[in-house]
């Protein structure tokens, strides 16, 4: 562990009965870094966060915060959750309805027997940082969802924990407010130089907020990297399919040339792409291309096919085109409305992954 590593998880395993949830997960969080645990339901991301928090009981591995072991199965160390000094922000906000905003935020300090005058100073400082100082005497039911979320974050930050853990912090907000809250939360994390571990199932949220993403699948880390690496250099079909909005087509390998392969698709199209599979010629494979990489073309050519444009959908900043290609519905984006009919669709070879 380097001196920049604030949180280290090593070979953590956890099962519910005979059902393994985490299968030897290792990860690090550096000071001032935001790492998102991303994955579908049941992948183990929330269980990993709760194991770090001390709310779940692993049976193997270790967790260290700022050089202090808070869990070590081999050494018999298991520090209780309330003594791990971690900031926790729950999906439900978990605010006490009978306490004011001030008292909700003050509660962790009172638990730690901080002096009363210092509590007042630190609570007002936390509320001011989050734009809540004028709401100190209100109760949770008098606040909007976004305000309740910020109170929950203020409570987690008030005692300056080395690491803040956020479990789906934006999931209770509507779509428009989520985008605004995402920008606000990322800005807060950067300005306060927080070290944060965030659970989310939303890949757009993970990419916007994170320095690094750990994509979990079936209790193991499928791939980890920066948002640009995860989006632009997926190493497996699962990663390519989970990140982004995709056209996915099935077929068979028709030819191989070095790091490229041609796939003859079930929809009648043949395309060259970047080979991410060891499958031999004649074997089944899948082609993946991001929706934004597919594009209309003026005429035939390399990696172009004539397909039926069924409809154009207006999305505000762009149109989305829907094509019929054999059994597949393919999608692409463009700037103007297009009438239905035959169109040339280009799938650029450097944007097609073949798995």
Image: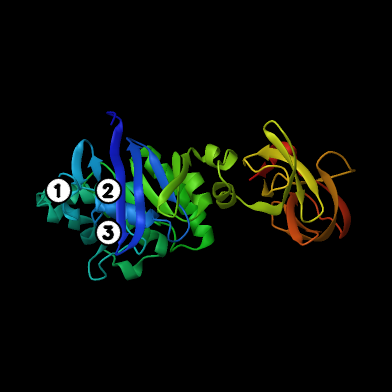
Q: Which of the 4 quarters of the picture holds residue 132?
A: bottom left
Query: Are dots 2 and 3 in contact, CB under 8 Å?
Result: no
Q: Secondary structure at mark 3?
A: loop
Identify the image quadrant of the N terminus. Answer: top left
Residue 104, percent across and down?
23, 60
Q: Are marks 1 and 2 in contact (CB under 8 Å)?
A: no
Observer-side mark, 1 or 3, equals 1
The answer to whether residue 193 shows anywhere in this view is no
Q: Which label lies toward us, 2 or 3?
A: 2
Q: Residue at x 13, y 56 (%)?
A: 111
**Callout 1: SS:** loop
| CA distance separating discs 2 and 3 | 16 Å
Q: Is residue 241 left or right of residue 328?
A: left
- Please name the residue shown 70% across and 54% down the image: 250
Q: Are marks 1 and 3 in contact (CB under 8 Å)?
A: no
**1 or 3: tag closer to the N-terminus:** 1
Percent from the top left, x then y, of residue 5? 30, 34
* Rendered image quadrant of residue 172: bottom left
Q: Is residue 137 depicted above or below 247 in this figure? A: below
Q: Is residue 63 left or right of residue 322?
A: left
Mark before the other along the chain sequence, 1 or 2:
1
Between 186 and 274, the residue placed more toward the observer is 274
> Which disc number belongs to residue 76?
1
Q: Which mark is residue 157?
A: 2
Q: Position of residue 27 (x, y in %)?
A: 35, 41
Q: Give the Cα separation between the discs numbered 1 and 2.
A: 29 Å
Label 3 neighbourhood size at 10 Å, few (<14), some (14-19), many (20+)? some
Q: Residue at label 3?
A: 136
């Amino acid at each position: 562990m380097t001196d920049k590593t604030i949180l280290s998880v090593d070979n953590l395993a956890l099962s519910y009965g005979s059902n393994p949830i985490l299968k030897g997960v290792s990860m690090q969080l550096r000071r001032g870094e935001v790492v998102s645990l991303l994955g579908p339901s049941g992948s183990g991301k929330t269980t990993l966060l709760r194991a770090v928090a001390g709310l779940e009981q692993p049976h193997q591995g270790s967790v260290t915060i700022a050089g202090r072991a808070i869990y070590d199965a081999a050494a018999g160390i298991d520090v209780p959750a309330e003594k791990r000094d971690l900031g926790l922000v729950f999906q439900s906000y978990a605010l006490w309805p009978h306490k004011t905003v001030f008292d909700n935020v003050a509660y962790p300090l009172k638990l730690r027997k901080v002096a009363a005058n210092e509590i007042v100073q630190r609570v007002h400082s936390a509320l001011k940082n989050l734009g809540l100082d004028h709401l100190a005497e209100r109760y949770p039911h008098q606040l909007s969802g976004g305000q309740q979320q910020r109170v929950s974050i203020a409570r987690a930050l008030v005692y300056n924990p080395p690491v803040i853990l956020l479990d789906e912090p934006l999931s209770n907000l509507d779509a428009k407010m989520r985008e605004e809250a995402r920008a606000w939360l990322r800005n807060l994390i950067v300005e306060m130089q927080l070290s944060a571990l965030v659970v989310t199932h939303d890949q757009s949220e993970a990419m916007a907020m994170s320095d690094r993403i750990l994509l979990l699948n079936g209790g193991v880390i499928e791939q980890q990297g920066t948002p640009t690496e995860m989006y632009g250099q997926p190493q497996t079909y699962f990663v390519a399919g989970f990140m982004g909005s995709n056209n996915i087509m099935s077929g068979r390998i028709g030819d191989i040339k070095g790091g490229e392969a041609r796939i003859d698709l079930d929809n009648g199209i043949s395309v060259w792409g970047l080979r991410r599979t060891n499958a031999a010629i004649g074997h089944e494979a899948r082609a993946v291309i991001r929706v934004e990489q597919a594009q209309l073309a003026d005429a035939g050519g390399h990696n172009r096919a004539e397909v039926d444009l069924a409809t154009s959908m207006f999305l505000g900043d762009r149109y989305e085109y829907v094509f019929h290609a054999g059994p597949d519905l393919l999608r692409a984006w463009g700037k103007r409305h297009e009438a239905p009919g035959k169109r040339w669709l280009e799938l650029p070879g450097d944007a097609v992954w073949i798995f």
